[in-house]
Amino acid sequence: MSEPIYLETSPKWSYAVAVEWPGWARHAKGEADPIEALIDCGPRYGSVLAASGIEFQPPAELEVVAVLEGDVGTAWGVPSIVSTFDHRPLDAAEAERQLAILRAAWDAFDRAVAAAEGHELRKGPRGGGRDLPRLLDHCVKAEQVYLSKLGARKPKVASDDWREIEAAMRAQAVEAFSDRAAGRPVRAPSRARELWPPRWYVRYTAWHSLVHAWEIEDRRLD
């Protein structure tokens, strides 16, 4: 049985995105094939899920079920188009599955950071690339934005430790996701005017967590 994917295209970067597996999305530049990039990272994605007890086998076949025209975000290098697939309602079982995959992505990020502490991250060919503290700062600030777009405000944390900040934000996100999936008002609402669908929040946040988890793993100097 083939696995449905969609493409998000732009002249510079294009994405291949698995419909049913949040976080399994890869891009390619110019004429390169993002589907090949998606296939290549299938085993790595599967390892992330397996570490959290989620069964996943890279599919033998992929079926392109939609091609979406990207925007400036796509051209810059991030998936940006919310598809009709992410506007589908969530029953209780699927909501739990989505959260399990999101938690697996968060866990993968945490493991990558823990393994990289005390190590230098390899620089790019021109000396570019964030060090670990700057990467952590970027990820914390990004997830604050994602949380707001889910519909929940940033929790107050009396600490500047990224682990405590992330733990509080993740707990707030799980609560807000569950509220929205069940059709309830979010208990700690943000002021965001346009909210992300819950499925898109999970898809984007899992993707972002894995992109940086794998970046840290690949750039770590032992």
Image (cartoon, grey):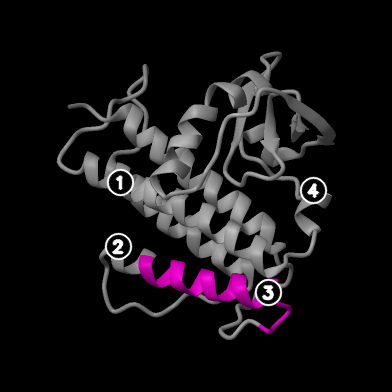
Q: Assess disc 4: are there few (<14), some (14-19) or many (≥20) residues with their C-alpha within 10 Å of its C-alpha.
A: some
Badge 2 marks a residue whose secondary structure is helix
Amino acid carrying mark 1 in the image = Arg
Amino acid carrying mark 2 in the image = Arg
Task: Compute the Cα span from label 3 to label 4.
Answer: 18 Å
Identify which residue is drawn at 39% across, 72% down: 168
As for residue 180 lying within the magenta part, the answer is yes
The image quadrant where one finds the C terminus is top left
Taking depth in this image into account, of 91 and 123 the one nearest to the observer is: 91
Identify which residue is drawn at 46% across, 31% down: 44
Q: Which residue is mark 4?
A: 83
List x then y, in percent, for residue 49.
47, 44
Do residues under tags 4 and 1 come within 8 Å of each other at their CB atoms? Answer: no
Horizontal relation, residue 48 to residue 199: left or right: left
Horizontal relation, residue 81 to residue 37: left or right: right
Taking depth in this image into account, of 141 and 95 the one nearest to the observer is: 95
Q: Assess disc 1: are there few (<14), some (14-19) or many (≥20) residues with their C-alpha within 10 Å of its C-alpha.
A: some
Task: Compute the Cα span from label 1 to label 2.
Answer: 12 Å
Badge 3 marks a residue whose secondary structure is helix
Taking depth in this image into account, of 17 and 20 the one nearest to the observer is: 20
Task: Compute the Cα span from label 4 to label 1.
Answer: 31 Å
Q: Which residue is mark 2?
A: 163
As for residue 34 lying within the magenta part, the answer is no
Find residue 111 and name its label: 1
Identify which residue is drawn at 83% across, 51% down: 84
Badge 4 marks a residue whose secondary structure is loop
Amino acid carrying mark 3 in the image = Arg
What is the span of residues highlighted in magenta in the rendered image? 167-185
Mark sitting earlier along the chain (2/3): 2
Q: Which residue is mark 3?
A: 180
Horizontal relation, residue 92 to residue 169: left or right: right
Mark sitting earlier along the chain (3/4): 4
